[in-house]
Image: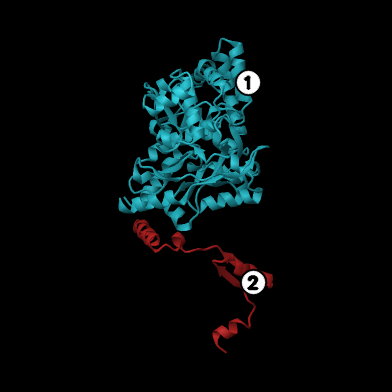
Chain colours: A red, B cyan
Amino acid sequence: MSPLGELFHQELRVINLGLEYFAEEIERLGVPVIHVAWSPPAGGDPKKAALLAALADEDEDDA
Amino acid sequence: MSIKTANQTTLQRLTEAQPFLVDCVPAAQAMGLTERIVLHAGPPLPWERACATVQAAICCAVRYEGWAPDDAAAADLLRRGEVRIGPCHHQAAVGPMTGIITPSMPVFVVENRAHGNRACVTINEGLGKVLRFGANDASVVERLTWLAREAGPVLGAALRATGGIDLRALMAQALRMGDEMHQRNVAASSLLARRLMGALARVGSDAQAIARVADFLGANDQFFLNLAMVAGKATTDPCRGIPDSTLVVAMARNGTEFGLRVAGLGDRWFTAPVEMPKGLYFPGYGPEDANPDMGDSAIVETIGLGAFAMAASPSVIRFVGAGGFQEAVAATEEMAEISLGEHPHFKIPTLDERGTPVGIDIRKVVETGITPMINTGIAGKVPGTGQIGAGIARAPLACFEKALEAFGRR
C-alpha cells in the first residue's frame, strides 16, 4: 500500500490552513483539527508582496 | 542602518520614555502661539474640507478668543486666512476629538526626561456638551473661560510644586486597575487626584477656587485621557526621523482624513478617508447621526495602550459594544500580530503579566491586512450635538500601503 493509502487507514489528525470553513466541517465529523489562520501576504497583491519580501530581506541581513 | 536595528532603536524610545507632567500654562506661553491660530486634531486640513462638526468647533474657538462676535464672522476670518488653522501635531501638541487649541487656552506641559523634549495638551473639559465633541453654545465658552481664568492657573501652581508627576508609572499602575487609558481613565484620573490634592491645597489661597477645581477633577472619569495622550506625544516625537525604521509614530484623524507618520519617513503624513466608528449609541442616537472618526487620541494606541491594552480593561470592551473578556483578549492578541514587541512597563495582569503590544510595523499591517484598532468616542455629525456614543474605529489600510510604497522608494 502506498504511503498515502496508509495515511487514510490511521487515525486522522488534521491541520487546516486558510479557509476556516474546511476546519469546521472536519470538526463536525468528529476529526481532531487545528486551524491555522493564514492568508497570502498583502492579500495576494504580487507587487506589494514583492516589496514586503525585499524589505524583509533587509531585516534578515542584520540578523 | 538595517531596518531591524532601526526598529529596535524606535522601540526602545517608545518604551523607555519618561513623560513627566510638569506644568499647566496658557498655550501662548507654552507653545509660542502668538498669532491668531486655531489648532485642530489630525493631519493638515484646509478649512473648506473640514467636516461641519470640526468647523463648528473652530468657529466657537474663534468666538472664545474674542476674534469674532459670531460664527458667520468667524467663518469669514477663516476663509480669508486672517485666522489660520493647523494641526496640533505640528506644534508638539495633541488634542482629543476636534482637538481645538487656541493661544489663551491653558495646556498641560509634559517633559520627556529621557530625551528632553516637551509636549502639550488642553485640560479635558468633561462630558456632555463640550468643544472637543463639536458643541458650541454659551455653556461651552463659559467652561473654557473658567478653565483659563481659574482651573489652569491653580493646576499649574500645584504641578510646579510637585516637581513633576511620573505619568508612565501612573499609567502602568492604572492599567493594573482596569484602565486602558483611552475610553476608561477612572483609575488614572483617581491616581492623579491623589498626587495633586495635597499640592492644590498648599499652593492655593482661595479655598473656594480649590474646591471648584477639585470638584471638576473628581466629576470627570475621563480627566486623564488628555494626559495619556500628551504622554504619548512626548514619547513618540523623539522617534520621528529615525532612518530606516518602519514603525508608526503617529496616528490621527481630523473628521475627514486619517493620517499616520512613520519613524523612518520624517514629517510626512500618509492619509486616506477616515472611517466610521462602530459601537454603542446613547439613547435616541444611531449610526446615521455619527460623525466620521476624529481626534489625536490614537496616539494612545501608538504607545501600546487603548485598544492594544483591551485585555487589561474588559469593562471597556462592553462600553464600546464589542463583546466580553474573550473578545478583549482576542483584540490585544490581534494587535500583537502587527506590533514589534511587548511593553516592558505596561503589564497586563490577566495575560500573566505580558506587556501590551507596542511598535506598530507598517510591514506587518500590509502583510496581514490587520489594521490598528482604536477605542474612540463618537461625536454627532450635526454641529452642537456633542458626544452620542463610543466604539471602535480601524485605521484605513490604504495609509499603511502608501507609507510602505514610500518606504520602498526612500
Q: Residue B208: x and y, percent?
A: 61, 12
* Up-down relation of residue A31 to residue B189 (above or below): below
**Residue B265 picture location, percent across and down:** 34, 45
State whether residue B404 appears in this view. Answer: yes
Tag 2 and tag 1, C-beta contact below 8 Å: no
Please, what secondary structure does the residue beneath circle 2 have?
Answer: helix
Q: How many marks?
A: 2
Could you tell me which chain the residue with mark 1 belongs to?
B
For the C terminus of chain A, the quadrant is: bottom left
The furthest residue to the bottom: A1
Q: Is residue B190 left or right of residue B107?
A: right
Q: Foreground residue, B219 or B206? A: B219
Estimate how packed mark 2 is, as few (under 14), some (14 to 19) or many (20 or more) residues with alpha carbons within 10 Å.
Answer: some
Q: Which of B231/B70 is in front? A: B70
Give the secondary structure at mark 1.
Answer: helix
Tell me which chain the residue with mark 2 is part of: A
Q: Position of residue B130 (x, y in %)?
A: 56, 27
Q: Are marks 2 and 1 on the same chain?
A: no
Residue assigned mark 2: A26
What amino acid type should be assigned to the residue bearing mark 2?
Ile
Q: Is residue A7 above or below residue B163?
A: below
Residue B386 picture quarter: top right
Residue annotated with mark 1: B215
Q: Is residue A3 above or below residue B129?
A: below
The residue located at (57%, 36%) in the rendering is B380
Q: Quadrant of residue A15?
A: bottom right
Q: Nearer the viewer, residue B114 or B227?
A: B227
Q: Is residue B24 in view from this perspective? A: no
Q: Amino acid at mark 1?
A: Asp
In the image, residue A23 sits, relative to residue B62, either above or below, namely below
Q: CA distance from mark 2 to mark 1?
A: 60 Å
